[in-house]
Image (cartoon, rainbow, N blue to C red):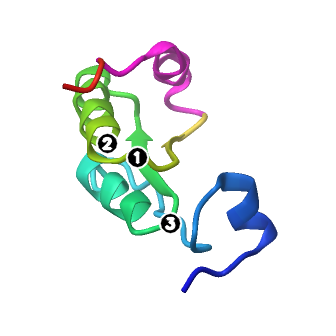
């Protein structure tokens, strides 16, 4: 059963649940699973390692068609945050 709140309406999710974007722990598979389950999955961008981020962005993009996002430590990842805004997933196979 879904719970309708301002939060769920704003983000387009079924449940008012958000995955904390824990860098290195909240990867693409976990973010996709939370989003598929009706929450808002957040990929932990952490310190902005581009190789890790590129790999995990692809995993979450392929793993769900539901809303998801990326969380960064603002003092540590400004360059990678800018890069992730330009990142676009490959077309689904």
Q: Residue at x 41, y 44 (%)?
A: 65
Q: Which is nearer the eye, 80 or 68?
A: 68
Q: Residue furthest bottom?
A: 1
State if disc 2 and disc 3 touch (CB < 8 Å). no
Q: Residue furthest left?
A: 93
| 87 inside magenta stretch | yes
Q: Is residue 26 visible?
A: no
Mark linked to residue 83: none
Please say if 88 is above or below 64.
above
SS state under label 3: loop
- Tell which circle, 1 or 2, labels the residue nearer the N-terminal end: 1
> Label 1: few (<14), some or many (≥20) within 10 Å?
many
> Label 2: few (<14), some or many (≥20) within 10 Å?
many
Q: Which residues are magenta?
A: 75-90
Q: Which residue is mark 2?
A: 60
SS state under label 2: helix
Q: Residue at x 57, y 69 (%)?
A: 14
Marks counted in the figure total 3
Picture quadrant of residue 57: top left
Please say if 81 is above or below 13.
above
Q: Which residue is mark 1?
A: 43
Q: Which is nearer the eye, 61 or 81?
A: 61
Image-based side of 87 in relation to 63, left or right: right
Residue 3, position as x, y percentages in the image: 65, 81
Image-based side of 59 in relation to 11, left or right: left
SS state under label 1: strand
């Amino acid at each position: 059963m879904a719970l309708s709140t301002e939060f769920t309406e704003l983000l387009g999710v079924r449940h008012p649940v958000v995955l904390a974007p824990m860098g290195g722990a909240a990867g693409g598979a976990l973010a996709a699973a939370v989003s598929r389950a009706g929450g808002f999955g957040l990929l932990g961008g952490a310190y902005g390692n581009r190789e890790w981020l590129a790999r995990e962005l692809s995993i979450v993009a392929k793993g769900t068609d539901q809303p998801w996002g990326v969380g960064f430590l603002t003092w540590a990842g400004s360059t990678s945050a800018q890069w992730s805004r330009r990142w676009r997933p490959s077309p689904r196979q």
